[in-house]
Amino acid sequence: LLLQIQHGGASSKGFIGEYRFLPKSNYLNDGVEIADCSYRIEKTKGVLYSPSYPFYYRSFVNCTYILPQRKGHRIVLSSGEIRLGREATIDIFETTNGVGKLK
């Protein structure tokens, strides 16, 4: 990490800040990567992260998270934070008795 600060010459008080390093292991998906940014999730409960989270999402990336249907179960997806750019889209594939509908 290189932190470089350039100042234009005017008088100022400077700055104060904090930093901390977060281990990458804190932000791993509970799935197996089957292709670039495509994950198959086999666990019945877990977490999903976008690439590079909590940092910026890469440009021109398409990610897929496959959660196979489990007989007798429903799925609940929740998110604490979704911040996508103006060009981003989210597609949800809904299945009912094996017949899918794009929503």
Image (cartoon, rainbow, N blue to C red):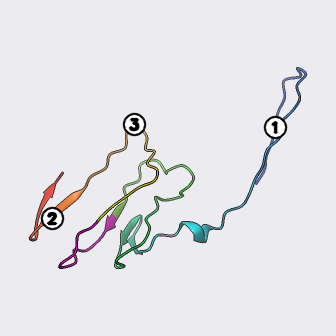
Residue 48 vertical position relative to residue 90 in the rendered view, above or below: below
The CA distance from mark 2 to mark 1 is 52 Å
Task: Give the camera-side residue of 81 and 5.
Answer: 81
Crowding at label 1, few (<14), some or many (≥20) Cα neighbours within 10 Å? Answer: few
Residue type beneath disc 3: Arg
Residue 58 vertical position relative to residue 98 in the rendered view, above or below: above
Q: Of label 2 and label 1, which has the lower sequence position?
A: 1
Residue type beneath disc 1: Ile
Crowding at label 2, few (<14), some or many (≥20) Cα neighbours within 10 Å? Answer: few
| Disc 3 element | loop
Q: Is residue 66 magenta?
A: yes
Q: Position of residue 16 (x, y in %)?
A: 83, 40
| Disc 2 element | strand
Q: Position of residue 67 (x, y in %)?
A: 29, 71
Q: Position of residue 40 (x, y in %)?
A: 34, 73
Q: Of label 1 and label 3, which has the lower sequence position?
A: 1
Residue at (41, 64) in percent of width and height: 37
| Horizontal side, residue 34 vs residue 102: left or right | right
Q: Which quadrant would residue 96 be assigned to in this image?
A: bottom left
Reading the image, the residue beneath label 2 is: 95
| Horizontal side, residue 74 vs residue 22: left or right | left
Reading the image, the residue beneath label 1 is: 5
Write the start and end of the magenta stretch as one range. Answer: 65-75
Reading the image, the residue beneath label 3 is: 86
